[in-house]
Image (tube, rainbow, N blue to C red):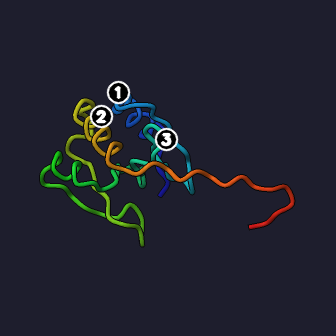
Amino acid sequence: MSSKQDFVDFIIDQIKNAGLITFKKMFGEYAIYCDGKVVALICDNKLFIKQTEGGKSFIGNAIEAPPYPGAKLSFLIEDNIEDGEWLSELVMITTKELPEPKPKKKKIKGESK
């Protein structure tokens, strides 16, 4: 089942104070970026935050689940989804702990992968 744009918009609005928030639609689901780092996925209208030690400490009793079959476990956020302040704090904590994205290699015209 694909996620609905209105759910994505709701989540983006909830975390708007965490930093520069953007998203990208991929295969009917969404990757959520904060300051250029993928911090979360929205799959089947559920929010999955990438796992970090700081995030786990902040959440407390975290529910871990894969966002899609074969994926690494993430924190499934259900209870505090409407608490924008709490959710923004979690995203900020997660963003700080994630590594910087690797720079993309420039493609040379005519070169294949």
Name the quadrant of the C terminus. Answer: bottom right
Amino acid type of the residue tagged 2 in the rendering: Ser
Q: Which is more toward the observer, 51 or 81? A: 51
Nearer-N-terminus badge (1/3)? 1
Residue 7 rendering spot, x and y as whole percentages: 41, 40
Amino acid type of the residue tagged 1 in the rendering: Asn
Amino acid type of the residue tagged 3 in the rendering: Gly
Q: Residues within 10 Å of mark 3 (few under 14, many from 20)?
A: some
> What's the mark number on residue 36?
3
Label 1 – label 2 distance at C-alpha: 6 Å
Seen in the image, is 22 located left or right of residue 58?
A: right
Q: Which is more toward the observer, 54 or 45? A: 54
Q: Residues within 10 Å of mark 1 (few under 14, many from 20)?
A: some
Residue 73 rendering spot, x and y as whole percentages: 32, 64
Tag 2 near tag 3, CB within 8 Å: no
Tag 1 near tag 2, CB within 8 Å: yes
Residue drawn at point x = 23 percent, y = 49 percent? 55
Residue drawn at point x = 39 percent, y = 47 percent? 39
Nearer-N-terminus badge (2/3)? 3
Give above or below for 22 relative to 78. above
Q: Which image quarter: residue 53? A: bottom left
Q: To which residue does mark 1 refer?
A: 17
Nearer mark to the viewer, of 1 and 3: 3
Nearer-N-terminus badge (1/2)? 1
Residue drawn at point x = 38 percent, y = 60 percent? 67
